[in-house]
Image: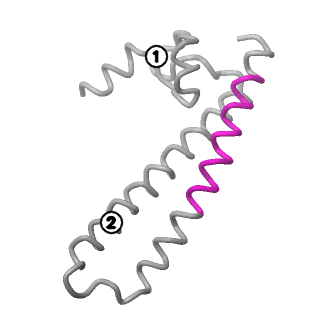
């Protein structure tokens, strides 16, 4: 991968990470507020608890994606970005364009998901 392509992906990843960190802070603040209120009583208790669970899952998903993005940025620094971590083959540019944080080629991703 040439330096211009790497810079392109670095810029995409850094922008994604910045947006994700900001959104995660907001979600965590909302979760903290939810945990300290006494709104979990009465007729809306089930709905409120379900909303809290969904918000918790979203926050955890954001954390996992942030980890993957940071890992991709590390791979750019190490010179291994764009190479499958399982088989060493190049990851298709279209796949990286769609999801710059991926670390597996499509074939290895499919094997991983099938396992």
Foreground mark, 1 or 2?
2
Residue 105's label in the rendered image is: 1
Q: Main secondary structure of the magenta part?
A: helix
In the rendered image, residue 75, in percent from the top left (x then y), is placed at 65, 29
Residue 23 included in the magenta stretch of the image: yes
Element under disc 2 = helix
Which quadrant of the structure image shows residue 1? top right
- Quickly name the residue at label 2: 51
Residue depicted at 34% across the width and 85% down the height = 39
Q: Which residue range is magenta in the image?
A: 7-25
Q: Secondary structure at mark 1?
A: loop
Q: Residues within 10 Å of mark 2 (few under 14, many from 20)?
A: some
* Quadrant of the rendered image containing residue 16: top right
Q: Nearer the viewer, residue 39 or 35?
A: 39
Neighbourhood count class around disc 1 (C-alpha, 10 Å): few under 14, some 14–19, many 20 upward: many
What whole-number distance in Å separates the C-alpha atoms at marks 1 and 2?
35 Å
The location of residue 60, given as percent across then percent down, is 43, 55
Q: Residue at x 74, y 23 (%)?
A: 8
Question: In the picture shown, does residue 22 fall above or below 39?
Answer: above
Colouring mode (rainbow / by chain / secondary structure / one colour): one colour
**Looking at this rendering, what residue extends furthest in the front direction?**
43
Residue drawn at x 45%, y 21% is: 86
Task: Examine the rendered structure and indicate whether residue 105 appears above or below residue 40.
Answer: above
- Whether the residues at callouts 1 and 2 have beta carbons within 8 Å, the answer is no
Residue 30, image x and y in percent? Answer: 50, 71
Which tag, 1 or 2, sits closer to the chain's start? 2
Q: Locate residue 33 relative to residue 109 in the image: left or right.
A: right
Quadrant of the rendering where the C terminus is positioned: top left
**Residue closer to the observer: 109 or 60:** 60
Q: Please provide percent x and percent y for residue 87.
A: 46, 14
Is 110 contained in the magenta span? Answer: no
Quarter of the image for residue 24 reads: bottom right
């Amino acid at each position: 991968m040439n330096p211009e392509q790497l810079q392109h992906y670095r810029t995409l990843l850094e922008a994604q990470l910045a947006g994700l960190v900001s959104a995660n802070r907001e979600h965590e603040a909302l979760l903290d507020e939810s945990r300290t209120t006494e709104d979990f009583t009465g007729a809306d208790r089930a709905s409120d608890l379900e909303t809290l669970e969904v918000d918790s899952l979203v926050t955890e998903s954001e954390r996992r994606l942030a980890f993957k993005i940071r890992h991709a940025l590390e791979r750019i620094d190490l010179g291994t970005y764009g190479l499958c971590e399982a088989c060493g083959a190049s990851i298709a540019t279209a796949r990286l364009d769609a999801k710059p944080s991926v670390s597996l080629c499509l074939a290895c991703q499919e094997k991983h998901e099938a396992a």
